[in-house]
Amino acid sequence: AKAFLTLAGIHHVARRGWEADDLIAALWQNVRRDHPEAQIRILSADKDLLQLVDSHTEQVRPVSSGPTDRWDVARVSEKYGVPPAYLATAMALIGDTSDNIPGVHGIGPVKAAKMLTENGYLLERALAERPEDLEVARMSFALINLRTFTYAEEGLMLPDLPPFGPTSFAGVLSMPLIRYLDRYLLESVKTRLAARSLWHQPVLIGD
């Protein structure tokens, strides 16, 4: 995948020891800080990234067929019962078995949304009468929180990165890319490349 992106001239970022959701969240925070009004679109099936959705950010979750699966503030709020900014707090109560995130026994999505809504979205207030569960919830929140995690304080601040922008198709290395597609027998991708339907913008053929 990294070789394909490089040959196709598509900007990409990788850091040893970092998971993709942390990289995305760090970049999101950088853009939010430097360009508060910028429109951001996150393409990922990872539901943890829904916590980054706001009035200037939407998440597009890949689907194999049907309409584009877009998530905005209203849709996240309707699905989980809390605004995206508090989704990590809700998940700290609910838990997530797919990511090995422990939750609080007896609390599901509906109850979590009700508890948080009635207590200002604060774990300490929501679990004021259950102190034994508060530490579990705090640990889960720390594991799942992407929105307000301070990367700089943890020594994880990304170095300066080139800004994300539209792919420059003038920079596509056409022949090396075609040889790459031939090597891995990616005939359908090669056909779309030749038909100029692989990207929304036209692909410039040439060395």
Image: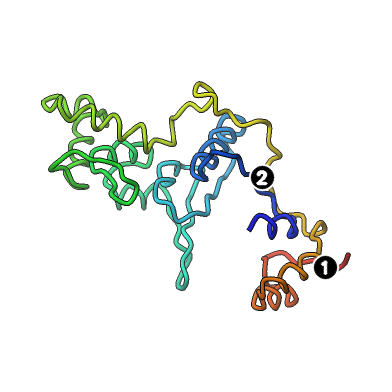
Instruction: Identify residue for label 2.
Output: 164
Left or right of 97 on screen, residue 132: left
85 relative to 98, above or below: above
Instruction: Identify residue for label 1.
Output: 175
User: What is the x, y in percent for residue 99?
Assistant: 34, 47
User: What is the x, y in percent for residue 161?
Assistant: 68, 36
> Please, what secondary structure does the residue beneath circle 2 have?
loop
Q: Amino acid at mark 1?
A: Met
Q: Quadrant of the N terminus?
A: bottom right
User: What is the x, y in percent for residue 173?
Assistant: 81, 61
Left or right of 143 on screen, residue 175: right
CB within 8 Å, label 2 to label 1: no
Q: CA distance from mark 2 to mark 1?
A: 25 Å
Crowding around mark 1 (Cα neighbors within 10 Å: few <14, some 14 to 19, many 20+) is few
Badge count: 2
User: Looking at the image, which residue is at 57% across and 29% down?
Assistant: 33
Q: Give residue 168's quadrant in the image.
A: bottom right
